[in-house]
Image (cartoon, rainbow, N blue to C red):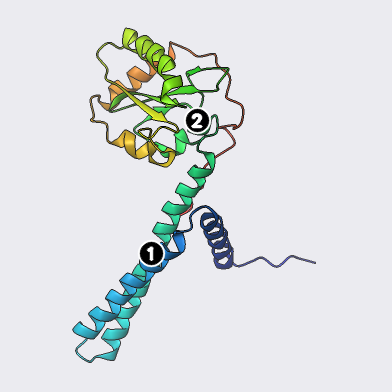
Amino acid sequence: MARTKKPKGSSRLAQMWQVFQMTRRYDKSVVGLLLLAFLLPTGAGVAAGLILSGGNVFTLVIWIIVGVMLGLLIGLIVLGRRAERAAYSQLEGQPGAVGAVIKSALKRSWIAEEMPVAINAKTKDAIYRAVGRGGVALIAEGPISRTQRLVDDEKRKTAKILPNVPITVLTVGPDEESVKLYKLGWQLTKIKPALTKSEVRVVSNRLASLGTNVPIPKGIDPYKVRPSRAR
């Protein structure tokens, strides 16, 4: 007997419901945010309709529909952002978390590898590297007090072969001044551009000559784990 195919619409609604349920478990504020995201534009649409329709029912209905559609759109955007943040929060603090999300968190203008370029085999603290218009970014994973030596060593090696390229250090860890995992991509976009697109590729190839022979930290396989990118 042939199986009945489920309509695509119902499948998407089921996926959205699963995303919402997952997000709500880790983000208690998501329900209130979604209600605000939907009700404010809808209310604005109703108000605009009452003011601008001039008693025309058709115009009033159009304004209400516009408000509802806008509310749904903003709600989906909010849900996607909170879902992504919830997914990152599940990985935060685990060895290899930066490697697991570095590809999806960075824009195409940045070149990065999931494997760390340096690692402390005992503590599993690691250093990851990204190259972009802003130069070279070294991303430390772990407490600042433990990763400082790794950062200094990697920064010295990088500066030796690329003396004129700016190097930015970011730390993802438990310290108050550290970058939250879900803000990593945004922090990189704040770095002032210093290289052209062609120079980015040259710098990336030059750094590849340094090589690396470190194992992936146990706990997460960055080739298998990806944060949710639901929208």
For the point 55% across and 21% down, which residue is it? 123
| Left or right: 215 in relation to 29 | right
Quadrant for the C terminus in the image: bottom left
**Helix, strand or loop at disc 2?**
helix
What's the mark number on residue 99? 2
* Displayed quadrant of residue 179: top left
For the question of whether residue 107 can be seen, the reply is: no
Q: Position of residue 182 (x, y in %)?
A: 42, 42
* Displayed quadrant of residue 39: bottom left
Query: In terms of sequence position, does the residue under pointer 1 or pointer 2 come before the other?
Result: 1
Q: Badges 1 and 2: C-beta atoms under 8 Å apart? A: no
Nearer the observer: mark 1 or 2; the answer is 2
Residue to which mark 1 is pinned? 73
Separation of residues labelled 1 and 2 (CA atoms):
31 Å
Quadrant for the N terminus in the image: bottom right
* Displayed quadrant of residue 176: top left
- Name the amino acid, label 2: Gly
